[in-house]
Amino acid sequence: MKNRNFDVWLAIGLNILHYRKEQGMTQIQLAEKANISRTYMQKIETAASSCTLDTLIDIAEALNIPLKKLFEFRD
């Protein structure tokens, strides 16, 4: 993704990956719960694609975490 906010999207994607793995979920399982395709989920996790806020809300709900957790960036 050629985006001036690539680092932010990468951090969000890594947070999604972290919480997904923590819950023992596959990309397919999370994608199904969030009503998106597995390939789109993979693109979001790797920052190959950005997404809407609505999609981030759906992902957070599928992970059963507060939305703000996706925006807690680690150093």
Image (cartoon, rainbow, N blue to C red):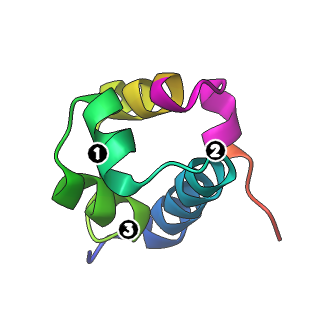
Amino acid marked by disc 3: Ala
**x%, y% of residue 67?**
60, 28
Between marks 3 and 1, how big is the CA–CA gap?
A: 9 Å
Q: Are marks 2 and 1 in contact (CB under 8 Å)?
A: no
**x%, y% of residue 75?**
83, 71
Amino acid marked by disc 1: Cys
Q: Is residue 13 toward the left or the right of residue 37 in the image?
A: right
Res 15 → quadrant: bottom right
What residue is drawn where x is 49% and y is 59%? 13
Earlier-in-chain disc, 2 versus 1: 2
Outermost residue, right side: 75
Q: Name the quarter where the N terminus is drawn.
A: bottom left
What residue is drawn where x is 39% and y is 41%? 30
User: On the image, numbered disc 3 is attached to which residue?
Assistant: 47
Instruction: Please state the extent of the stretch shown in magenta in the rendering.
Output: 62-70
Earlier-in-chain disc, 3 versus 2: 2
**x%, y% of residue 43?**
28, 64
Which type of secondary structure does the marked residue at label 2 adopt? loop
Relative depth, front residue between 64 and 4: 64
Q: Which mark is residue 51?
A: 1
User: On the image, numbered disc 2 is attached to which residue?
Assistant: 23
